[in-house]
Amino acid sequence: MTPALHNGTYTITSPTGAHRTFKIATARKGNLEGNRILSLMVGRDNENDYMGFAFVNDDGVAMWSKFRQEFYEKCAKMVWSMGTLGNESPYVKAGVTMEASKRCMKCNRKLTNPESLELGIGPECASRAA
């Protein structure tokens, strides 16, 4: 069975321009091996600075007890809704966007910032090109 929401890195941007980046990945080792984990980017490194807060399965998102808080529950609901309903999501209808990460056309690093996603080039490479 194909997952309803695929593994990947997604940036969600509100109509005000505020954004958050999330990653869905399958754990490869340890106690969580085989589980798909929803994580929030919590630092500047868009490859490694993620904190897991829920499991993702084909039926929805299961919050970890430590993160059963309004902020994380809203994030999980938004990722699931936009990832599974697409344009029918109430968040999309309210002007929120969700975009999968891309790679910089110069250095091939992961892009997650909305402006970088739009331009196709990261800020470091853009400043060198200017």
Image: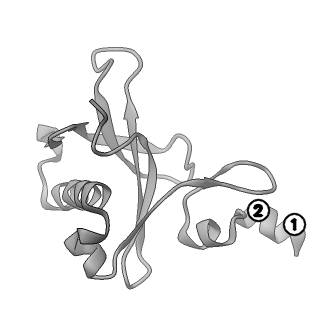
How packed mark 1 is, by other alpha carbons closer than 10 Å (few <14, some 14-19, many 20 or more), is few
Q: Which secondary structure lies at badge 2? A: helix
Image quarter where the N terminus lies is top left
Q: Look at the picture and state if 100 lies above or below 113.
A: above
Looking at the image, how many numbered discs can be counted on the residues? 2
How packed mark 2 is, by other alpha carbons closer than 10 Å (few <14, some 14-19, many 20 or more), is few
x, y percent for residue 80? 24, 54
Q: 116 left or right of 63?
A: right
Q: Quadrant of residue 8?
A: top left
Q: 104 left or right of 45?
A: right
Which residue lies at the image location 21% right of the left edge and 37% below the top edge?
58
Which residue lies at the image location 60% right of the left edge and 73% below the top edge?
115
Specify the color scheme: one colour
Q: Which residue is mark 2?
A: 124
x, y percent for residue 118? 61, 72
Marks 2 and 1, Cα distance to the nearest angstrom? 6 Å
Q: Which residue is mark 1?
A: 128
Depth check, front residue: 52 or 23? 23
Q: Which secondary structure lies at badge 1? A: helix
Q: Look at the picture and state if 16 lies above or below 77.
A: below
Q: Look at the picture and state if 53 lies above or below 78.
A: above
Which residue lies at the image location 28% right of the left edge and 26% below the top edge?
35
Q: Quadrant of residue 96?
A: bottom left
Task: Tell me, yes or no, whether the two marked residues, 2 and 1, touch with CB atoms within 8 Å.
Answer: yes
Q: Residue furthest right?
A: 129
x, y percent for residue 112? 55, 59
